[in-house]
Image (cartoon, helix red, strand yellow):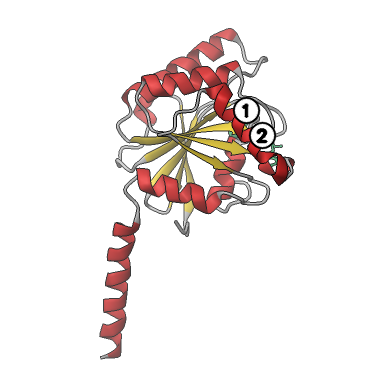
Amino acid sequence: MKVTKSEFVISAVHPDQYPVDALPEVALAGRSNVGKSSLINRMLARKNLARTSATPGKTQQLNYYRANDDLYLVDFPGYGYAKVSKTQRAAFGEMIERYLLSRDELKLVLLVVDLRHPPSKDDISMYEWLQYYNRNVCVVATKADKIPRSRWPKHIKVVKETLGFKQHHSMVMFSSETGMGKDELWGIIESYTDLGSEANETYAGEESESLLGDQE
Ligand code: GTP
Ligand code: MG
């Protein structure tokens, strides 16, 4: 998908703040500091739309970003960050659980993991939760630029085995640093959000018709 327009829409704390325009939503879950916000910036071709930080725990609400007028990328708070208080952690958990359980607009969850390391206990729990809630999942193994290509297969194997990866889910290698995996990930997102070729063909058709019209 070619993103020509993107914007930050809202940091939602309560469900009554979620957008009501019924656009499809793609959420990003993953450990704190794994690179979720960076991935959003790369996908939207914006440097600093989603706030990134070397300090973990930056994203603490559901942050909605709109791509064109087509869909929302929803940035979750990262989990596994020790300095977040127990009360805060429980509140995040509840918010995310409610969202995963009941949000009809949610079409796909990107489970973002670090290709360099085996998925954590929290990653495994999140993956199990997503299956329990019957959500479509794409595992995105990011920071791939930090590992030589020759070692990717070994790391992919560890990620898959540790997670107990299910073959009917998708998996993509990604790097927010280089942009690797961006097109493939957009392809997957489009296929789950009904933004695939059909809509684009109609659009192209309309465009060529009006071009012909101009010539007459
Ligand atoms: P929280 O909001 O705390 O949950 O973190 P996050 O998952 O949004 O991580 P964020 O995008 O803020 O990135 C954390 C750090 O990792 C930053 O210093 C990024 O520059 C770096 N980073 C993210 N993605 C990549 C990547 O693909 N390659 C490299 N080399 N660094 C990355
Ligand atoms: Mg973030």
Question: Looking at the picture, which amino acid does disc 1 mark?
Answer: Val
Q: Residue at x 37, y 25 (%)?
A: 15
- Where is residue 158, by image quadrant? top right
Residue drawn at (54%, 37%) of the image? 140
Q: Could you say which quadrant of the image residue 175 lies in?
A: top right
Q: Nearer the viewer, residue 173 or 33?
A: 173
x and y, in percent, of residue 173 in the image: 58, 42
Q: Which mark is residue 158?
A: 1
Q: Quadrant of the C terminus?
A: bottom left
Queried on whether the Cβ of the residue with tag 1 lies below 8 angstroms from ligand 1, the answer reads no
Q: Nearer the viewer, residue 185 or 83?
A: 185
**Residue 168 higher or lower than 122, as above or below:** below
Relative placement, left or right, of 189 versus 115 is left
Quadrant in which the N terminus is drawn: bottom left
Residue underneath mark 2? 154
Question: Pointer 1: residues within 10 angstroms few (<14), some, or many (20+)?
Answer: some
Q: CA distance from mark 2 to mark 1?
A: 6 Å
> Where 215 falls versus 146 (above or below)?
below
Q: Is residue 169 visible?
A: yes
- Residue beneath the point at 56% across and 18% down: 122
Asked if the residue at tag 1 contacts the one at tag 2, i.e. Cβ–Cβ closer than 8 Å, the answer is yes
Residue 48 position within the rendered picture, expressed as x and y whole percent measured from the top left:
62, 46
- As rendered, which of 117 and 10 lies closer to the eye? 117
Q: Who is closer to the viewer here, 193 or 68?
A: 193
Which element carries disc 2, helix, strand or loop?
A: helix
Amino acid beneath label 2: Lys
Image region (quadrant) for ligand 2:
top right
Residue 122 sits above or below residue 191 on the image? above
SS label for mark 1 = helix
